[in-house]
Image: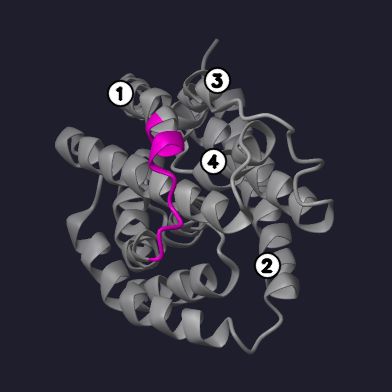
Amino acid sequence: MEILLGFLIALMIGLTGVGGGVLTVPVLVLYLGVPTATAVGTALSFSALVKLPACAVYVQQRRVDGRVLRYMLAGGVPGVIAGSLFLSRLTGKGLEALVLTVVGLTIAVTAAINLARLWGDGGGRRPAADRAHRLPWLTVPIGVEVGFSSAGAGALGTLILLQFTVLAPAQVVGTDLVFGLVLSALGGGLHVGLGSWDAALFAKLVAGGLPGALVGARLATVLPARLLRSVLLVWLVYLGAQLLDRGLRALALLPA
């Protein structure tokens, strides 16, 4: 079952470009019953591995802007460390219901932002001047969000690059992809160190995910990616809402 889920998740990532974290966490929690913190840590590690081939292609094609990436990582790295430690602290205090609520809200909002961008104007009017020096302040909360829920780097990272830099579209995608890879790898490593991951589950997801990513990348050239992405994002809004509802119900049962 886990191998099949890994294949399907990576297949959809390859077909639609939707981030691995935002897709993996709700599937693990809702369909496999994995604890939220463990799902986040496992999803981050899985997402980092699945993103590696695509990142290598963008780097080889020189579609990653090193200067902008450094600005993003200056805020994103401390953010993902803080988010990962915060998640561990909440889980350790038995506040899993609160974690589930925040993760569900994050996933639903992230998917909704992606959906709005997909059917909107692609990010609005491009800026006339480069404002990349402001990126560290903007990527701190993105890093926190990634470390806490494994979601956010793709949707929000792309959005701020479109609004604060003059990068070409291919450079926006490549730079944000590498940014997401670094945050996923760092966050996943921290969660591994904190014990918030499942090694056996990770291995099974990877066993299915590697061929799934290859198949998805090939099918993306012949299938209507925009329609598939839209359907997937609507489903993710629903899954995020399900997580949010489950978390709020659990919070309501806690003693005052």
How was the colour assigned to the protein in this rendering?
one colour
Name the residue that disc number 3 marks: 134
Q: Quadrant of the C terminus?
A: top right
**Label 2, label 1: how many angstroms apart (C-alpha)?**
32 Å
Instruction: Decide which of tag 2 and tag 4 comes sooner along the chain.
Output: 4
Query: Is residue 135 something that shows in the picture?
Result: yes
Question: Magenta stretch?
Answer: 61-70
Looking at this view, name the residue that lies furthest to the top: 256
Q: Quadrant of the N terminus?
A: bottom left
Instruction: Decide which of tag 2 and tag 1 comes sooner along the chain.
Output: 1
Name the residue that disc number 1 marks: 85
Instruction: Decide which of tag 1 and tag 4 comes sooner along the chain.
Output: 1
Query: Residue 106: percent from the left, percent from the top?
Result: 59, 37
Query: Residue 149: percent from the left, percent from the top?
Result: 46, 38
Circle on res. 152: 4
- Seen from the viewer's position, the closer of residues 44 and 60 is 60
Name the residue that disc number 2 marks: 229
**Residue type (three-letter) at the residue carrying disc 4:** Gly
**Residue type (three-letter) at the residue carrying disc 2:** Arg
Instruction: Decide which of tag 3 and tag 4 comes sooner along the chain.
Output: 3
Instruction: Decide which of tag 1 and tag 3 comes sooner along the chain.
Output: 1
Which residue is pictured at 68% across the width and 67% down the height? 229
Which residue is pictured at 54% across the width and 41% down the height? 152
**Label 1, label 3: how many angstroms apart (C-alpha)?**
25 Å
Query: Residue 25 magenta-drawn?
Result: no
* Residue 187 in which image quadrant: top left
**Residue type (three-letter) at the residue carrying disc 3:** Arg
- The local secondary structure at tag 4 comes to loop
Q: Label 4: few (<14), some or many (≥20) within 10 Å?
A: many
Circle on res. 71: none
Which residue is pictured at 60% across the width and 25% down the height? 131
